[in-house]
Amino acid sequence: MKYDKDTTQLNDPIYGFITIPNGVLFRLVEHPYFQRLRRISQMGMSYTVYPGAHHTRFLHAIGAMHLAQVAVQVLRKKNVVISPEEEEALCIAILLHDIGHGPFSHAMEHSIVENVNHENISLVFMQALNEEMDGALDLAIKIFKDEYHRPFLHQLIASQLDLDRLDYLRRDSFYTGASEGAINVQRLIAMWDVHDDNLVVEAKGIYSVENFLVARRLMYWQVYFHKTGVVAEQLLAKMLKRAKELVSNGVTLPASEALSFFLTESVTLENFSEKALTHFAALDDTDIITAMKAWKNVDDFILSTLSKMILNRDFLKINIEREPISKERYEQKKIETQEHFQLTAKEVSYFVFTGKISNQAYNMDKSPIYILTPEEKMVDVAKASDQLNLKMLSEKVEKYFLCYPKRK
């Protein structure tokens, strides 16, 4: 890629000055599709627990792109041949990897669109941008979809030790103040190498990988799965689901044009049309907050109450336990709530519900993290490590929650 006096720089609180090269990358950053990420929170409802967690997907994507530039420099010094075209495509792919996120990150995936995750939508965005830019994203899309013949490039953007995870752990740790996630990103990248076109970590970097996996586990339990954040995100999804249900029954609700589209239409991956993309590209956190402020005054008790709960941070009570919630206990809470608020059996599900969260810091069966031994053998980090707890981190830990109204 070309770096010259006209190159744009951003001052990032994590890495300092980040360089955005002229050309396709700069055009992508300036595009309205990408600028929308300035208005999409990185951590959803986590600000209800950690008041500093107001950073955006925009800054995370820029940070991940910067780490891609650093990684390419490191690998080239180790005689890994990466062409300028491959470097640019890698940076494009990581820059756009989260462009498909909707308002408050994951809430949209479980409410007003039907089983369409942000990765699917990111690819739709990339294809639309590629058409607009006359095929300039062809190679980036191949890498993003893992269809390029050099797999390590895809592993840099989507694996268990990728640029995405490195940036969000370090960044989320910084903005929340949770020091458990403060990994040494520079040290980890410095230990990377490529062997048989696969991303590997030099043997002397094994302890940095162990620290990364432990940090990821702790951040999930302490930050991403904090019980208040869990119930807040559940309520947001329930609020959007209720709004869509009311609209489908003929009720008119105040909402932006973009949000109204998703409340009235049944959007799946199969029918995610150009029209759907246009409306999705206009949708951000502001649409949801503005709607919520209006919905707290509507006649519908459920939508009004859910909106007030989120706005006033007066959430449902949540119990998180290691064993599944008993059916008897769940039914009892439903009966109590149904009688107290005079709700139907269907309506009470908005206020009393169960769910499950799972944490698996490392999956030995999915794109393993390879340690390159002095004998140039690739060994799974869990097998190469002399720490027993690393194998334990590969076990999925599941916890179960029950949400219900507080007694006042």
Image (cartoon, rainbow, N blue to C red):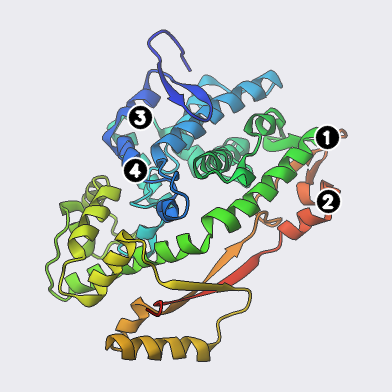
Q: Position of residue 273 (x, y in %)?
A: 25, 53
Rounded to the nearest angstrom, the CA distance separating label 3 from label 1 is 39 Å
Of badges 1 and 2, the one in the foreground is 2
Rounded to the nearest angstrom, the CA distance separating label 1 from label 2 is 22 Å
Of badges 3 and 1, the one in the foreground is 3
Rounded to the nearest angstrom, the CA distance separating label 3 from label 4 is 13 Å
Specify few, some or many for label 4: CA neighbours under 10 Å numbering under 14, 14-19, or 20 or more.
many
Residue drawn where x is 73% and y is 36% of the image: 201
Residue 5 visible somewhere in the drawing? yes
State whether residue 40 is above or below residue 293: above
Q: Which mark is residue 295?
A: none
Question: Where, quadrant-wise, is the C terminus in this rendering?
Answer: bottom left
* Callout 3 touching callout 1 (CB < 8 Å): no
Q: Is residue 27 left or right of residue 370?
A: left
Location of residue 332 by image quarter:
bottom left
Q: Which mark is residue 376?
A: 1
Q: Amino acid at mark 1?
A: Glu
Rounded to the nearest angstrom, the CA distance separating label 4 from label 1 is 40 Å
Q: Secondary structure at mark 2?
A: loop
Rounded to the nearest angstrom, the CA distance separating label 2 from label 3 is 42 Å
Residue drawn where x is 24% and y is 60% of the image: 292
* Callout 4 touching callout 1 (CB < 8 Å): no
Q: Which mark is residue 29?
A: 3
> Which is more N-terminal, label 2 or label 1?
1
Q: Position of residue 98 (x, y in %)?
A: 43, 44
State whether residue 79 is above or below residue 67: above
Rounded to the nearest angstrom, the CA distance separating label 4 from label 2 is 42 Å
